[in-house]
Image (spheres, helix red, strand yellow):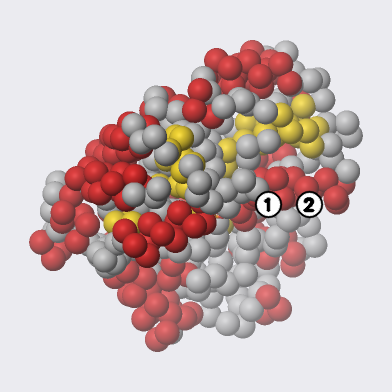
Amino acid sequence: MVTTVNTTGRTGVAIPRPETSRGGLTRRGFATATLGATAAIGLPASAAQADPAASQHGFDPADWGSVRDQFTLSRDYLQFSAFVLASHPRQVRDAIERYRDALDADPIAAGAGFIDEDGSLEVRTSLAGFLGTDADDVALTDSTTMGLALLYGGLRLGSGQEVLTSEHDFYATHQALRLRHQRGGVPVRKIRLYDDPAMATPDEIVTRIVRSITPRTRVLALTWVNSDNGVKLPARAIADALRDINARRDLSDHVLLCLDGVHGFAAENITMTDLGCDFFATSTHKWLHGPRGTGLLWGKPEHWPFVAPVIPNFSREGYEGWVGDRDPVAAPAILNTPGGYHSFEQRWAVPAAVRFHETIGRARIAKRITSQATLLKDELDRLPNVRVLTPRDPSISAGVVCCTVEGWAAADAEHELRAVHKVIATETPYAQPHLRFGPTMLTAPEQIGRVVKAVRALR
Ligand SMILES: Cc1ncc(COP(=O)(O)O)c(C=O)c1O
């Protein structure tokens, strides 16, 4: 495809595109025209719209039992790790199947082509709606890890500027920063945000961060909800503290709050404005139960230009720039969306997951997760053989619940819980692993007692 595109937009292969001239159209206007054209050939927009989650197959979004019925996730176990890699609800499975069938029948007509001419605009728009942002600020990725790599690999840093991260962060953040350090010598400093996660407080965390910021600090690379101990960082309070610091700095010198947001996204009912960060990477294949291999990187419009793309994008602007031997002019989020053909059936099905979630109700889902997590922490805390690592207060915790069990390595506890008690928990993938549970919309408060009984039995 690459070699056949020319500046007039005529191609040697049939990349679906509107017959409309693009002259004078903004990307938004262009996108509308594009979707119109896509709908005219019947795919993928028409397929994307055919998913009224609430009316099919007797699905009752008000009934948690009916929500659970949409998933084929095994009922042989209590599924307290369903957030790790999503099982898809029927609505998402159906959408993926429709797109896969269309791609198998005729990939070109199905819309495999330039970003936003391929049905991905609906994906970006739907995710932007979920985040409370503009679609132009949403780059599509395959995972949180990819988003973090694009961000930390691509951020333009001046000489002397440094990255501040925490000792508690996950491999994806630390390794992306290590790779960046190896490439350009960017200094990366790690700090401790708390000594005991169970006792962590927003004040302590903000104080430690502010104390550690120096005039060289350009990036604050953190994880919103920690997957090793369940601590949810007070992102808004951190952002407020940074606002005061940044008020005295040039834009190119602002301390950027960059979050791995994966364990808060769709588990918490929050928008990017509420959260207050500058960049946010997540996948949609965890708490949203979206298609596996999908994700996003969101950035504030004023900060996106500081991210240099590291993977060629597949946008019409990108190709036109290449053909004209000049830099492409397009929204930075477009330029930072990795190109190459994708597993489009997965990507195009993301709006089905967003619709499913919103049909049930974001606030209801978040409340159900939080109330189960609180109950689980309270019950585990009563056990003499257990130390709960996750703070009890929902203002500093989310759905991830971590603990240690006396005399048990996390891996052995995980195995015993699964094999003997039919409870699926996970060992955290960190240097000193812990035992982790995650109540989701697929679990029920009535199941907590059985989980706790199983942990008590680990004597
Ligand atoms: C904090 C955190 N970030 C990122 C990931 C990886 O997620 P993804 O598949 O979206 O890259 C995980 C675990 O899988 C995680 O715990």
Q: Which residue is mark 1?
A: 149
- Measuring from the top left, give residue 379's x and y in whole percent: 31, 35
Looking at the image, is 344 positioned above or below residue 259? below
Looking at the image, is 224 positioned above or below residue 358? above
285 and 91: which is toward the camera: 285
Looking at the image, is 224 positioned above or below residue 55? above
Side of 450 where 22 appears, left or right: right
Q: State whether label 2 is within 8 Å of ligand 1.
A: no
Q: Amino acid at mark 1?
A: Ala
Side of 13 where 108 appears, left or right: left
Tell whether label 1 touches label 2 (CB within 8 Å): yes
Element type where label 2 sits in the image: helix
Mark number displayed over residue 179 = 2
The crowd level at tag 2 (other Cα within 10 Å; few <14, some 14-19, many 20+) is some
364 and 372: which is toward the camera: 372
Q: Amino acid at mark 2?
A: Leu
Q: Name the residue: 48% across, 80% down.
A: 108
Q: State whether label 1 is within 8 Å of ligand 1.
A: no
Work out whether residue 278 can be spotted: yes
Instruction: List the single residue furthest toward the left.
Output: 58
When asked about the image quadrant of residue 274, the answer is top left
- Measuring from the top left, give residue 122's x and y in whole percent: 41, 56
Side of 401 where 146 appears, left or right: right
- Measuring from the top left, give residue 82's x and y in whole percent: 37, 56
Q: Name the residue: 78% across, 57% down.
A: 326
